[in-house]
Image (cartoon, rainbow, N blue to C red):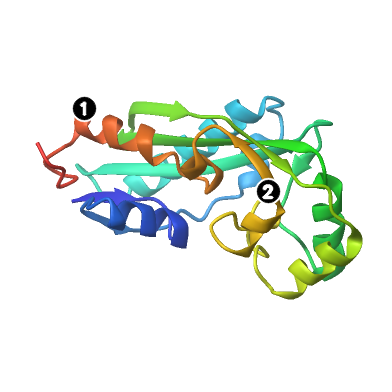
Amino acid sequence: MIILASRSAVRVKLLRDAGVAFEADAADLDEDALVKDIGDPAAQALTLARQKALHVARRWPGRFVLGGDQVGHNDDGAPLVKPRDPPHHVELLMSMSGRTHRFYPAVALVKGDVVVASVVDVVAVTFCPFGAEVARLYAATGEGQGCCGGYESEHRGAQLIERVDGNLQAVLGFPLLLVLPLLRAHCPVEAGLLR
């Protein structure tokens, strides 16, 4: 069994549905401090994934630990964040209306204090043009409050999307189709994978 350095409901569900044997143990780190001097979003995501996995690996000596994170940016370079409150949620959604934003999901597999493997993906999401009323209605559902960008593509947030260029699972923040080969290459038995 491997350790997932996260309690993200999406990451847990994707791994569970894929039949991976794991236990979840979230890292508690100051993420902003870890990436404050890193400008490249892919490098930010990789740094966060690695640091989360390394942090949790200290509690699980000898076990493979999988860390993951995601960074998002709008087409103007503005970082996508989690909504602070309903007005900010509407503002965030409106900033993406009719525009393309990118997510950079990353994962790192560590054992002890060694990063065994890591990978980062990129996926572009184009939103349909919509007005403030649509943004308010969506924000009022409460969906997407804890998500980078303020929406959930696997639920009602799908209605906001015009096009996805890349892996849809990557939009969810966990590029499963890149994670599974990484696990097969390094710890198939521990992850309970088909061989």
Q: Earlier in the sequence, mark 1 or mark 2?
A: 2
Report which quarter residue 65 is drawn in: top left
* Residue occupied by mark 2: 161
Q: Residue at 51%, 42% (x, y): give it.
A: 168
Question: Which residue type carries mark 1?
Answer: Ala
Q: In this view, does 23 lie above or below 110?
A: below
Distance in Å between CA atoms under marks 1 and 2? 34 Å
As helix, strand or loop, the secondary structure at mark 2 comes to strand
Q: Residue at 80%, 54% (x, y): give it.
A: 93
Q: Is residue 25 left or right of residue 148?
A: left
Question: Which residue type carries mark 2?
Answer: Ile
- Where does the image place residue 72, in percent across and percent down from the top left? 67, 40
Q: In this view, does 172 lie to the left or right of 156?
A: left
* Residue occupied by mark 1: 185
- Where does the image place residue 30, in percent across and percent down from the top left? 61, 49
Q: Residue at 37%, 49% (x, y): give it.
A: 56
- Where does the image place residue 120, in percent across and percent down from the top left? 49, 29
Q: Which of 146 and 178 is in front in this view?
A: 178
Foreground mark, 1 or 2, reads: 2
Q: Is residue 47 left or right of residue 57?
A: right
- Where does the image place residue 52, in percent across and percent down from the top left? 46, 44
As helix, strand or loop, the secondary structure at mark 1 comes to helix
Q: Residue 100 carries which label?
A: none
Q: Mark 2 packing: few (<14 Cα in 10 Å), some, or many (20+)?
A: some
Q: Mark 1 packing: few (<14 Cα in 10 Å), some, or many (20+)?
A: few
Q: Which of 184 and 48 is in front in this view?
A: 184
The quarter of the rendered structure image containing the C terminus is: top left
Q: Is residue 59 visible?
A: no
Q: Is residue 64 visible?
A: yes
Q: Residue at 75%, 60% (x, y): give it.
A: 83
